[in-house]
Image (spheres, rainbow, N blue to C red):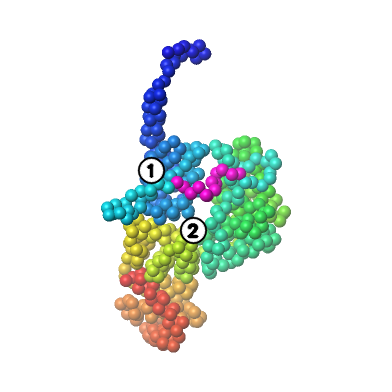
Amino acid sequence: MFFNENFTEFYRPISTQAKQNQIRQDVKKMNVNYENTWENCLKIIRDNVNLQSFKTWFEPIKPVKLEGKVLTIQVPSLFFYEWLEEHYVGLMKKTIKKELGPGAKLEYNIIVENSSASGKPHTINVPTQQGKKDDDIEVNVPVMGSIKNPFVIPGIKKINIDSQLNPNLTFDNYIEGDCNRLARSAGVAVAARPGGTSFNPLFIYGGVGLGKTHLAQAIGNQVKNTLKTKTVLYVTSEKFTNQFIEAIKTNSLNDFINFYQMMDVLIMDDVQFFAGKDRTQDIFFHIFNHLHQNGRQLILTSDRPPKDLEGMEERLLSRFKWGLSADVHGPDFETRVAIMEHKMYNDGIELPRDVIDYVAYNMNTNVRDLEGALISLLAHSSLTRREIDLPLAKDILKNFIKNNSKELTIDHIQKLVSEHFNLPLEMLKSKTRKRNIVQARQISMYFAKNFTKTSLVNIGKQFGGRDHSTVIHACQTVQDLMETDSRFKSRVQEIEKILQINFA
């Protein structure tokens, strides 16, 4: 024991055994906290993925241990591990480093089948792929002199802002259909000559999950890959607003404006959230003017067209209308099938045709739900080790499908046929004699007679008050055409197959 004059404290020499005990206690204390650490990570992840993906890919994960700054998590299969590494490794790395600090690492504990006589599953430990570039290490920004970068988030010393683009969102995996042909074609033109077309700004609008963000980022990625000297930036209106507020607080408003005025291509997502924020609109108005006057490209997305935006300054709305406003709407059946087939091809998987048709027909609201349904099928198949067939698809997706009735009605037939022909439903009941509409109406009547117990009189009434003789003529016409026109026959059989799949 000795006396330290500087600190007026008594110190006793610590034995080697005591040090080891202390280390064990510290390690034990850290291991106790591994569940809390993972729970904190989940709170962050939950805010960055949609609910369906979170339930499918993150809720089954179990934290195993925390040693130093290495968190080990257990995943239920090798497929599960590969999917996380392919789609979410960047998010998970950023999250774990935010929670545990620099140097934090993630390790997987994977449950795999044992080929030994015991037949019991065992686990293997795998670290995250080291070859992938950490998104939160490098800084890659245009030369800005002393301008303050608004993308430097308080509390994080280094962040790679690059262009804030998701490299996976490209034109190659953006499936074209009638629902998005104009918007996609305009996007390709803008990507080839940013600021050099009449599509400035390019205003893309449509409902949730229909691919607005994908298309906008595809343009940005194409510009980056082909015109490497161009500075591209993607930002949401919410982030822009928060940065603007921070710039006011820190007296760096000029730096904020100068930073955005340097961009060659500015992609502003969800501009409808500027509504009611007068000062944010004012600052964006000046940035917009500067970029447009200097031949820079602006790409804007919204859930509605400029004319329907409320709470926005007229001068800003007028500028939104300067270029091209292109809408994206819900994909038709053929486009939904193409989207599924493209995703299956990229992921190296195959599904039975009846499963593809069932999912494509029923998940008809938006692309996001369609992809979510496919992911749920793959995950369930992996976890339960069952082949994906139609009964499994119906069982897994029953909670996602609004109409789960087994009884086929004329309403169902009209809806399916009108969607197959890409026609408004009311056209089947109208008086028009246009060839494609007449043909769709006749096919609908044909199926109504053959697949429902409804009388001919009532069938006619549900098609705009027509009489029973019209129904008989329609059915005979369809039958005759099927015997003489192979293309027409294939089309009718394709619709019939979907009806049988969904209402068997």
Task: Check disc 1 and give the amino acid type.
Answer: Pro
| Mark 2 to mark 1 CA distance (whole Å) | 32 Å
Picture residue at 33% right of the left edge, 59% below the top: 385
In the depicted view, which residue is nearer to us: 214 or 405?
214
* Few, some or many residues within 10 Å of mark 1 (<14, 14–19, 20+): some
Q: Main secondary structure of the magenta part?
A: loop
Task: Look at the image and tell me in which quarter the C terminus lies.
Answer: bottom left
Picture residue at 35% right of the left edge, 80% below the top: 449
Magenta region: which residues? 127-139
Q: Which residue is mark 2?
A: 209
Q: Are marks 2 and 1 in contact (CB under 8 Å)?
A: no
Task: Look at the image and tell me in which quarter the N terminus lies.
Answer: top left
In the depicted view, which residue is nearer to us: 99 or 29?
29
* Few, some or many residues within 10 Å of mark 2 (<14, 14–19, 20+): some
The picture places residue 171, in percent across and down from the top left corner, at 57, 62
Mark 2 or 1: the one toward you: 1
In the depicted view, which residue is nearer to us: 303 or 230?
230
Q: Which residue is mark 1?
A: 63
Task: Decide: is 417 above or below 42.
Answer: below
Q: Residue furthest left?
A: 118
- SS label for mark 1: strand
On screen, residue 380 versus residue 171, left or right, reads left
The picture places residue 496, in percent across and down from the top left corner, at 38, 76
Task: Check disc 2 and give the amino acid type.
Answer: Gly
Task: Decide: is 4 above or below 19.
Answer: above
The picture places residue 358, in percent across and down from the top left corner, at 39, 67
